[in-house]
Each structure stands twice: as structure tokens, then as C-alpha cells.
Amino acid sequence: MTNLLILIPAALFLGGLGLIAFVWSLRSGQYEDLDGAAMRILVDEEDGE
């Protein structure tokens, strides 16, 4: 029973930390261009070498 007094707050803290990291990534624009990286690998660019 005393284990729950430690594990429940720890789980809530880690879940909140993950939520904060997810909201930060949304606000910083990490998910703006989802198709760009997928299409960029298919483009054959000549860089002059």
C-alpha cells in the first residue's frame, strides 16, 4: 500500500512531463511539414560534386 503512495505521484509527474513536452513540440512547429521530409528523400539533387 505504501508503494502506491510513491508510484501514483511518480506516474502523474512523468505523464505531466510528457504532456508538457508534447505541447512544447506542437507550439515550436515540429509537426508543421509532415510530407516534406518524406518527399525530400525522393528528390535527387545534384550538388555539383
Image (cartoon, grey):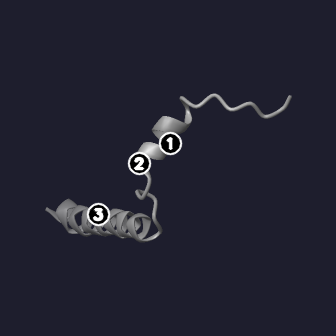
The structure residue drawn at horizontal position 63% and vertical position 28%, both measured from the top left corner, is 44
Query: Which kind of residue does numbered mark 1 sit on?
Result: Ala
Q: Which residue is mark 2?
A: 34
Looking at the image, is mark 1 or mark 3 nearer the viewer?
Answer: 1
**Nearest the camera: 42 or 22?**
42
Q: Mark number for residue 26?
A: none
Q: Which residue is mark 1?
A: 37
Query: Which kind of residue does numbered mark 3 sit on?
Result: Gly
Query: Which kind of residue does numbered mark 2 sit on?
Result: Leu
Residue 11 image offset from top left, x and y in percent: 26, 62
Looking at the image, is mark 1 or mark 3 earlier in the sequence? 3
Q: Mark number for residue 15?
A: 3
**Nearest the camera: 16 or 22?**
22
Residue 34 image offset from top left, x and y in percent: 41, 48
Residue contact at pointers 1 and 2, CB within 8 angstroms: yes
Looking at the image, is mark 2 or mark 3 earlier in the sequence? 3
The structure residue drawn at horizontal position 25% and vertical position 70%, both measured from the top left corner, is 9
Side of 7 where 36 appears, left or right: right
